[in-house]
Amino acid sequence: MVHSDEQEPSSADEFAFLLTTDNHLGVHEGSALYQAQVDDSFIVFEEIMSMAAQHNVDAILHSGDMFNDASPSKETLNRTAEIFSRTVFGAKPVSFTMHSEPDEVFGPGITANFHDPNHSVSVPMFAIHGNHDAPTGVGQIAAMDILSSGRWLNYIGKTNPVDEIHVRPVLLHRGAVRVAVYGLGYIHERKLHELMADGKVVWDPPPSPDHVCVLLVHQNRRARKAKWFLDPAHIPPFTDVVLWGHEHDCTCLQTVETLKLPQGGRTAFLLQLGSSVATSLSEAEAGPKVAAILRVRMRDGEPEVKLDVHRLRCVRPVVFSELAIPTGITEAAAVTMVGETLERMSRQASKEVDPRTAVPLLRLRVRHDASRIADNYGPIVAELAGRGLLINPHNAILKSVKRGTTKDSKDSGLISADEPKLEHVLLRRLVGQGRPEECQMKLVPASMLLERHEVFMSARGNLAELVLKLVDETAEAMRERLDALDLRDVGARAAVAKAHVVEVDSRAAEVGEDVVRAEDAEAIVEGGADDDAPAPRTRVRVGRRAAVKAPKAKAKGTQSVPQVGSDSEATPVKRKATPTRTSKRIAMRGQGKKLPALASPDWDEELLG
């Protein structure tokens, strides 16, 4: 592959493609903290799409994550449609022909937008979905489907269902040049790995060896926390160029990477353009943002591939730096040092950018000892933001403590240098303290929960598939754990325990009734009148507890007490004061009554007293 930055006109035997990926349209939308950056993704995307006319390309290839959300807002869709209308439609005729069956590459009943007589498409786009804008919901509809229905682009690489995948190429001819474009939209890494390992991903080879095969993919290139990625061993052996999406850092600005294909020993060119807008404040996003022109031409009867990489001019600058605050310095001096450093970083930012995105994103890591971690740099940062020196006052400063200066620190280095993401911190608090491997989750391992959370945060709306997969794996883990336990006699033990509870309740009821009868009988036997004596209490059994209530008082000095062993109405008798609790207990002991020995008694003290 020839690497060049020079612009050349397209000839009759040359096929020119504009390459882009990971535009993340609508990123930061709805966030008050990032409101000043909401327009960035659209400004850069329009710059990219305008390159199609500037460089006279024949088509556009997009490798996923055009949108930042699986369900973009109406405003995002509207702004995207406006950009497409200004750049894709026009009077210029399409300069190539397609030799694939539309139903096989676009879906049943869908034709290429440049074949639709109701639309004048001059620069067709062929695009796949990424993990952010993957199909979701009823019918598995993606935002790309909406753009396809509006004839703004041609959506390829959609797999539904994903139990078996058959990838067919879009065959494009321009003069003597033959190009086969393969598209594979984002699939969960583990699922894709299993399908490829089982041979359930089938690639149709090109109809002739003179086709230049371009593959659009949107997967992990290397192992991350989820440990799954697209192995080059599974890339079809006839591939010539891979346009790799999903990775946000650019690796093809100076040189073009090559990818050794294990099958057949062929070498493919790997183009990792990276994202066109910074979606997070990380050093990987601080690199240059680019788009590229891929030219395929015939030279001496053999196809030749050339790449022109163009740095984007409307990208907001991102600058990183570190500052160590000396021990013993005053707070005012520390604030001055931070302000001067931020000003210097702002001056370092490139000024050859669009005025709309000229104010830079700054991230300064300030290292303190433990005694200075509470220093407040908010006022100085707000002042610099008011002067237009930075766009992100809310997260421009990242404080960190030198490890070794606090009692809790055990390692050397910076605490904040390798801090986990906020969502991981919250999840770790949910599943247990410490690192995932230290969490004491028995049924669903913490590592699995963190992995599924990361996948969901990237896939967003593709909830149904993720939940079903997690339920299946959790059910399998539950079966394995239950099989490991000796639960064969659980049912028998439960029945015995239940019978024991019934027996205890019955004995408790008997004792309660004996207590009531003993008190009433004692009151009758002792008799006597006492004007100041309280009214005797009548007890009503409710479950295992006794509810105590006082009956209505009769004539002063008399009470209605039921005669022992009689069902007739109670007759007024005179009685003395109610015996004390001590005398009641002594009387019961004399009758030989014993309370059942219960581990957790649930009796009313008044009943037992």
Image (spheres, rainbow, N blue to C red):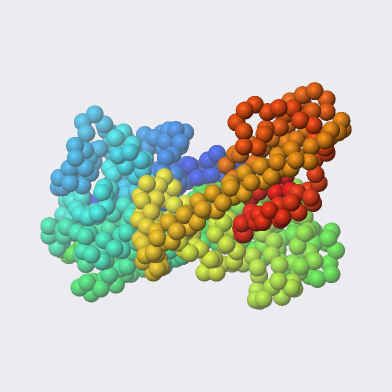
Q: Quadrant of residue 109?
A: top left
Residue 134 horizontal side relative to residue 207, left or right:
right
Foreground residue among 475 and 593: 593
Q: Is residue 561 above or below residue 43?
A: above
Name the spot of residue 295 as percent of width and height, x first.
Answer: 29, 56
Residue 299 horizontal side relative to residue 38, left or right:
left
Report how many numbered discs are placed on residues in the image: 0
Foreground residue among 19 and 102: 102
Name the spot of residue 159 as percent of width and height, x first.
Answer: 26, 49
* Residue pictured at 83% horizontal, 25% vertical: 556
Name the spot of residue 111 as percent of width and height, x first.
Answer: 20, 38
Q: Is residue 127 visible?
A: yes
Residue 213 horizontal side relative to residue 279, left or right:
left
Q: Is residue 355 above or below residue 258?
A: above
Q: Is residue 224 above or below residue 351?
A: below
* Residue pictured at 76% horizontal, 54% vertical: 586
* Residue pictured at 71% horizontal, 71% vertical: 408
Q: Is residue 316 visible?
A: no
Q: Which residue sits furthest top? A: 555
Quadrant of the image containing the N terminus? bottom left
